[in-house]
Image (cartoon, grey):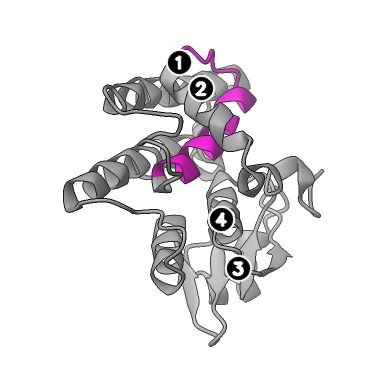
Amino acid sequence: MKLHGYFRSSAAWRVRIALALKGLSCDQVAVHLRHGDQRAPAYLKINPQGLVPALETDDGDILTQSLAICEYLDEIQAEPLLLPGTALERARIRAFAYAIACEIHPLQNLRVLNRLKALGQDEDGVKAWARETIATGFDACEALLEGQAGPYCFGGQITLADVFLVPQMANARRFGVELRWPRLHDAEVACLDHEAFSVTHPDLQWDAE
């Protein structure tokens, strides 16, 4: 397989984590978002949205959107399951992951922040927007974990929720968000003790700057 991504992209990091958890090898291709590689005609043929990540499968098919890619990996490599448990438990895990993937991250990603700048918002205002977006979303995420046992988001097994939480926590730090959510923090700490999270960290990627 071949993963098109960017070292700092939290969406690409999610897929790197999922691949590492499942022990799946994958070549990595850098798409430099700051340089605009995602808008190059050659990359738009791979992902018409001009976003990362994009995964080329062993059969040459191309998948986009980190959620879809992670669920695909869960189906082709069952162990360890990212969506374990009963139908109700899996729905709760999905809801948490979707809260990050659909409600928090899209509103603070590079494309949206650049549009805010184009509309006249200054750098301080743009960063304030990102911080407020993340903080409001994390308030909800903390509440979603109420009553859930640790050490991870949903008990003693790493799930899709953890795969999405850790990269978003890194985003929060990058924007200077005050991390006031003890349950999220504890789950992150537990995850970072696992090799799949540590070796896929953005700072350790070959295209890191």
Q: Residue 183 in magenta?
A: no
Q: Residue at x 56, y 55 (%)?
A: 21
Is the residue 71 above or below the residue 130 in the image? below
> SS for tag 2?
helix
Q: Identify the amino acid type marked 2.
A: His
Task: Give the number of marks.
Answer: 4
Q: Position of residue 120 (x, y in %)?
A: 53, 27
For label 1, the residue is: 182
Q: Position of residue 27 (x, y in %)?
A: 70, 70
Mark 4–mark 3 CB contact (< 8 Å): no
Q: Position of residue 119 (x, y in %)?
A: 49, 33
Outermost front residue? 156
Question: In this image, 92 relative to 100: left or right?
Answer: left
Q: Which residue is mark 4?
A: 21
Q: Marks 1 and 3: CB-CB under 8 Å?
A: no
| Mark 2 burial class by Cα count in 10 Å: few <14, some 14-19, many 20+ | some
The front one of 144 and 112 is 144
Labelled disc at residue 24: 3
